[in-house]
Image (cartoon, helix red, strand yellow):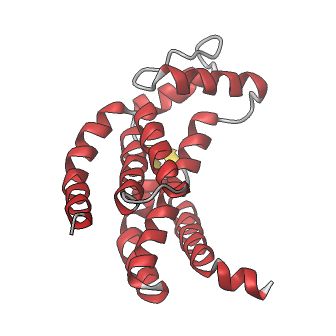
Amino acid sequence: MKTFIQKYKLNIVSALTIMSLVAYSLIVSGLRYETNDDATLSNIANGAFGGNSQDLIYINIFLSCFIKLAHTAFPTINFVVFIQLALVFISLYFIVLVIEEKFGIVTGTAISIILFLPFSTELISKFQYVKTSTIIITAGLILIATNLSKTNIRMFIGYFLVIMGCQIRFESFISTGALCAFTLLYYFFNLSR
């Protein structure tokens, strides 16, 4: 058990940091949609206006079909929220992990808390598809940028997060990609030295 904790200490601290921020956010603000169209999209997927439908505005048809199948199998679970909340949790976990690897556990955890605590309610409690897709895409691009010269599981997780973020709202990729282009260029040119 001790070797497991020592081996995965950084991962455990990152997960506990994110779980604390999620718990804080849900206790303080609860979970709700920020805008009406996001709630309406969830209701369409849940079948509030007839049968549940895969025709969700802005959400890619591949993700929409998966959501429809999941709702058909388990109609009481709101998969639109569940999938996005899980992806935000995974995204924040990897962002915190990268920060902690870069600055060490104590400093990295402090930076992560200072960075995410003011925005935790916005990212987690007030649900909006644009925000969730932006944080998911950002985490994916950070994983890709920090693993450019490597082929490992994190690189594939980065690609997966970018693809899933684009499935939720493709328009977020354009704005997030433009903002993250500088980071990618920095890592790219840094590799050539």
Left or right: where 82 falls relative to 34 = right
- Residue 25 x %, y %: 51, 63
Closer-to-camera residue (142/119): 142
Q: Residue at x 74, y 85 (%)?
A: 3
Q: Residue at x 54, y 68 (%)?
A: 18
Is residue 113 among what the camera can see? no
Most extreme residue toward the right, as rendered?
1
Closer-to-camera residue (38/138): 138
Is residue 69 among what the camera can see? yes
Most extreme residue toward the top, as rendered?
50
Indicate the quadrant where residue 79 lies.
top right
Left or right: where 102 falls relative to 55 = left
**Is residue 83 positioned above or below 3 on the image?**
above
Indicate the quadrant where residue 120 lies.
bottom left
- Residue 97 x %, y %: 49, 70
- Residue 39 x %, y %: 49, 32
Q: Where does the N terminus fall, quadrant-wise?
A: bottom right
Most extreme residue toward the front, as rendered?
193
Q: Residue at x 69, y 22 (%)?
A: 69
Left or right: where 36 falls relative to 17 = left
Q: Where does the C terminus fall, quadrant-wise?
A: bottom left
Give the total number of marks visible in the rendering: 0
**Is residue 126 positioned above or below 22 on the image?**
above
Left or right: where 97 falls relative to 77 = left
Indicate the quadrant where residue 112 lies.
bottom left
- Residue 10 x %, y %: 57, 78
Q: Residue at x 58, y 23 (%)?
A: 45
